[in-house]
Image (tube, rainbow, N blue to C red):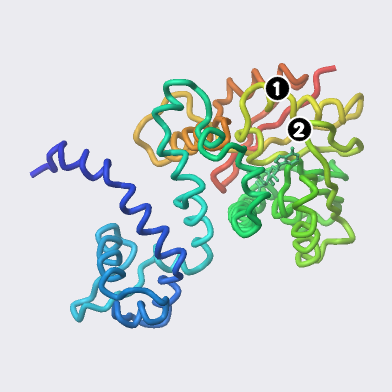
């Protein structure tokens, strides 16, 4: 028999129970305890300094979602999901399911009524100021972005023809996972990472760890003020979707100014919002990300047509969309003369 619609709605309405449970086990490092062998709730509680009966109830909730398995002897064992959690995904879960994000989501109704972003209303500051004030959360956010970006950098390095380019800069490049990935794949390139000065120490350490200091540097600055001139390509990944149209246009216009009369191009790397939404995994990812941008940053995930309009306002033509095998596209722009 098909599941009744009321049961499906109940499950959707209580999805946040699962999100909170996942956040808790990620914060406690429970999945890490199961990588070598199954363990009882008592063993897990002793290892994580928690209350065994309560931990057991949360573990069983996550069993129902396929995160762990409950064995016949009552012990818990791992699954591909918990192995992924233990393998470095716990930071991302703590970012996306943590209080920084779920508190503003609790104020969604007001955002729908007013169009204002909830984060500012709840915290009295924007997300990047929030992260700057909380170094531990800021570092976790940077690590999360870097882990997704390492994967996407491989896709970008493979999908785009960098052979004619010499100097490439990544605007809002964070710790430099994209730029180091691209210069490691293309030995003729010189790279630079441009981001707020607070990111400099982590970015320099990342560049050194990637062993590309000779060909990659960090440049501190504010992309609303000015970005450095003298590069053949301006990469910008997962930055434009953080901002509303007015501020996104300002960032792109600063890049256009830096290019001036030079023969350089814009390489924006983001997921595109499909023109029509359905229940596919791709559309679900885009819609989630878009609404999260609305709530947290005041930005949006854009369709190709919406990006083309932004490009035009900033002095670029959207020339090509190049898909990668890493869930993001390269949306190339060439300067209008
Ligand atoms: C969502 S993160 C993307 C980081 C990186 N591009 C990636 O995909 O891994 C946005 C980045 O924009 C940077 N950022 C925010 N405001 C900035 C500003 N005014 N000037 C320069 N960078 C800024 C943040 O520090 C952060 O590294």
Mark 1 CB within 8 Å of ligand 1: no
Q: Tell me if mark 1 has few (under 14), some (14-19) or many (20+) residues whose alpha carbon lies within 10 angstroms of its own.
A: many
Mark 2: which secondary structure?
Answer: strand
Residue drawn at x 60%, y 53% is: 141
Mark 1: which secondary structure?
Answer: helix
> Residue under circle 2?
266
Residue drawn at x 16%, y 42% is: 7
Query: Quick check: 228 above or below 72?
Result: above
Percent across and percent down for residue 150 are 64, 56
Callout count? 2
Residue drawn at x 79%, y 32% is: 265
Residue 45 in which image quadrant: bottom left
Nearest the eye: 337 or 138: 138
Query: Quick check: 175 above or below 38?
Result: above
Describe residue 208's horizontal placement relative to residue 177 as left or right: right
Query: Quick check: 240 above or below 311?
Result: below
Q: Quadrant of the C terminus?
A: top right
């Amino acid at each position: 028999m098909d599941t009744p619609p009321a049961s499906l709605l109940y499950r959707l309405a209580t999805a946040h129970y699962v999100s909170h449970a996942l956040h808790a086990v990620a914060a406690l490092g429970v999945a890490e305890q199961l990588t070598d062998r199954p363990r009882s709730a008592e063993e897990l509680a002793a290892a994580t300094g928690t209350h065994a009966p309560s931990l057991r109830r949360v573990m069983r909730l996550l069993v129902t979602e396929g995160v762990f398995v409950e064995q016949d002897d009552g012990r818990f064992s791992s699954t591909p999901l918990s192995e992924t959690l233990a393998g470095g995904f716990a930071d991302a879960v703590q970012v996306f399911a943590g209080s920084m994000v779920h508190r503003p989501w609790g104020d969604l109704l007001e955002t729908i009524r007013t169009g204002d972003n909830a984060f500012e209303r709840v915290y009295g500051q924007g997300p990047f100021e929030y992260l700057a004030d909380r170094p531990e959360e800021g570092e976790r956010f940077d690590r999360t972005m870097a882990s997704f970006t390492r994967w996407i950098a491989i896709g970008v390095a493979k999908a785009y023809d960098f052979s004619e380019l010499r100097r490439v800069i990544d605007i809002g490049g964070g710790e430099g996972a994209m730029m180091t990935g691209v210069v490691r794949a293309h030995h003729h390139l010189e790279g630079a990472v441009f981001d707020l000065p607070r990111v400099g120490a982590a970015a320099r350490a990342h560049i050194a760890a990637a062993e590309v200091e000779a060909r990659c540097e960090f440049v501190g600055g504010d992309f609303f003020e000015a970005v450095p001139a003298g590069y053949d390509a301006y990469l910008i990944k997962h930055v434009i979707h953080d901002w509303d149209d007015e501020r996104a246009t300002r960032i792109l216009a600063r890049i256009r100014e830096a290019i001036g009369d030079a023969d350089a191009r814009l390489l924006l790397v983001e997921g595109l919002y499909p023109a029509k939404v359905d229940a596919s995994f791709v559309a679900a990812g885009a819609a989630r990300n878009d609404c999260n941008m609305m709530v947290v940053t005041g930005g949006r995930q854009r369709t190709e047509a919406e990006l083309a309009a932004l490009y035009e306002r900033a002095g670029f033509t959207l020339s090509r969309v190049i898909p990668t095998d890493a869930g993001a596209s390269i949306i190339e722009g060439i300067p209008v003369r």
